Image (cartoon, rainbow, N blue to C red):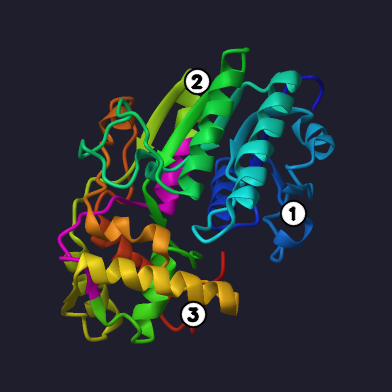
Amino acid sequence: MGTEQKVMLVTGAGGFVGRHMVDLLCANGHQVRATDLPLAARQPFPAGVEFMPSDITQADQVGPLLQGVERVFHIAAIFDYSAPEERLRRVNVIGTRNLVQAARAAGVKHFVYWSTGSVYGEHPLQTPTSEAYTPQPFVAYERTKYEGELVCTEEQRRGLPVTIIRPASIYGPGSLYAIGTLLQSMRRGLVKIVPGSGQARGAYVHVEDVCRAALFLSEHAAGADVFNVADDSAYTMNELLKFLAGQLQVRPPVVSVPASVLKAAGWALHIASKVTGRRPLLERDTIHYFLYDHLMDNSKIKSLGFQFKWPDTLAGMKDLVSSYAGNAAVRAS
């Protein structure tokens, strides 16, 4: 390989999004180095992918990952609204700091950081929300992802080209959390209610488009910028639940539960989860997504020429449900 840097590093490569990113890079002929915790690579990576296990919270394990690396796609994170804030901060903030510092020292040409559209907060006053809106993270997961953004911005000022992406709620083959959880629960007949009025409109994006956007921006963005990654749709929760019920051939929920009751149930389930050690079906810190609009403006990335393969949420969901046909359950991320 000589002195020319050609390797693409994917962190969190054993997870839902990381696997898709590795596959996309391989399909585009890139040399890929994948990293994650040792036990995360439960399934083999495509031929030619170099897997280097590491714990990014340990600074001494990060340096070797960056040798000969041209671009970094930093996906590794704790994505769990029920996780303790200290655990979230250790991975989402300290781990990110270790990586960006090592990337700058290694002369990485472009660093793409996975943030989240949820940094805009509980009830954004602007919707669809653009990148110019000041983030107002509401819960621990959102706070630590935004702190990760600030770490990246700080390192960018020191010379590391960084692009930050804020994906909407990601769905696609292999997902268990978020939309994956909803699909599994509906298939099992566990979704009996419509949260709130059912009129709140959420922002979604297919995992394939998130990865395509990250690769596109690593080639077309100069760094030091932030991009929303969300499809063109604006469906209400009622519309989404009705559509998914039809695709899964189950009865759609019709009983609306008021916000006050929903919040009380969220607290009760949160307390119960502390006793049982199990993640509740309805997480307290996610309830606001069912009550308020969380649409995202995607015009900025589209202005660079990016085109979504799955611009319509329902078309993407239909393809997703079809891909699960015959499977007993969605694969764990």
Residue 202: x, y in percent? 26, 54
Q: Amino acid at mark 1?
A: Leu
Residue located beneath label 2 in the image:
223
What span is in magenta? 194-214
Q: CA distance from mark 2 to mark 3?
A: 39 Å
For the point 48% across and 81% down, the residue is 327
Q: Going by the image, does 87 lie left or right of 247?
A: right
Hey, which quadrant is residue 263 in on the image?
A: bottom left
Q: Earlier in the sequence, mark 3 or mark 1?
A: 1
- Quadrant of the drawing holding the C terminus: bottom right
Hey, which quadrant is residue 277 in on the image?
A: bottom right
Residue 182: x, y in percent? 37, 71
Q: Which mark is residue 37?
A: 1
Disc 2 element: loop
Residue located beneath label 3 in the image:
329
Q: Can residue 323 be seen at all in this image of the molecule?
A: no
